[in-house]
Amino acid sequence: MSKTETDTVMAVTSPALGALPGLRHAFFTRQGGVSQGIYASLNGGQGSGDDKAAVAENRRRMAAHLGVQPSHIVSVWQVHSADAVVVDAPWGPDGRPKADAMVSTTPGIALAINTADCGPVLFADAKTGVIGAAHAGWKGAFTGVLEATVAAMERLGAHRTAITAALGPMISRKAYEVGPEFVARFAAADAGNTRFFSPSTRPDHAMFDLHGYNRNRLARAGIGAIDDLDLCTYSDEERFFSYRRATHRSEPDYGRLIAAITLA
């Protein structure tokens, strides 16, 4: 790959994770790839309807940005679960297990989460060399995917009070309207969850704060530091893909953003 190709890949980073030694990370934007049309341009979604060769090239560019081999940018088959798996070797696109979080202590493997409004969360305990990545949409967060990631990291030797977690671009409260049954589900689980909802302009609807809900779950898990980049996928079309925006436009599919972390 040429230096020019690598430099076109655009990503945002967490100051908190960036300050830690021995790792690299990126919340990739949609900019700097080769995909066309609704997938333009850095679509990393292996399960999308995009041209497979374009997706492979996009992921190759992301791998180069992170300093890992193309085969070592590893993703799971995401199913909105609370399941976390250990990664010690790449399994390839056809061997992806069904899960929504990954943890590792193996240098040179990039744990890569796909999102398009859901919350990408990257984790690191730099002292023990344990990293994690989670796909935290409302369902995964509600059922405990963030806590499952922390627990899986602890089983590899991490200490939760030494873990830093960074929340990347996800849909914001101002763009996330939900119905009454959604609010009722959260309120039934914990009356305190009502603070993550504010009134919508539509009767019986509310606006949900996924950022705040994910931060709260992490804080209650007792991790050491939380860094929320506070970026909205829906409102920033230039930089981010959005499932909800694509749905509102009746588009047939949507690109996927990649958030990834690796031990250097």
Image (cartoon, grey):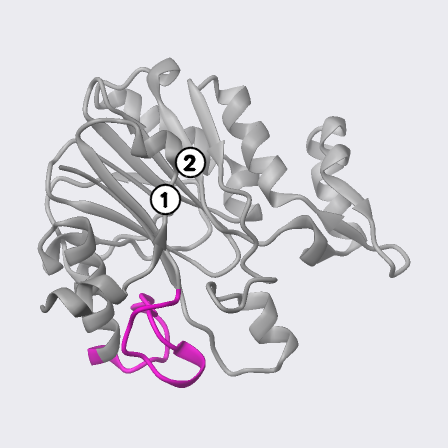
Residue at the (27%, 40%) spot, across then down: 85
The amino acid type found where label 2 is placed reads Ala
Q: Position of residue 243 (x, y in %)?
A: 54, 67
User: Residue 162: percent from the left, percent from the top?
Assistant: 34, 16
Measuring from the top left, give residue 241's x and y in whole percent. Answer: 48, 66
Question: In the picture, which quadrant includes the N terminus?
Answer: bottom left
Which residue is more in the foreground, 182 or 123? 123
Give the residue at mark 2: 166
Whether residue 94 is visible here, answered yes or no, is no
- Does residue 29 appear to the left or right of 71 in the view shown? right
Front residue of 202/154: it is: 202
Q: SS of the residue at dot 2?
A: strand
- What secondary structure is found at the residue carrying circle 1? loop
Q: Residue 136 colored magenta?
A: no
Question: For the magenta stretch, what is the residue range?
Answer: 30-53
Report which quarter residue 196 is drawn in.
top right
Q: Mainly helix, strand or loop, the magenta region?
A: loop
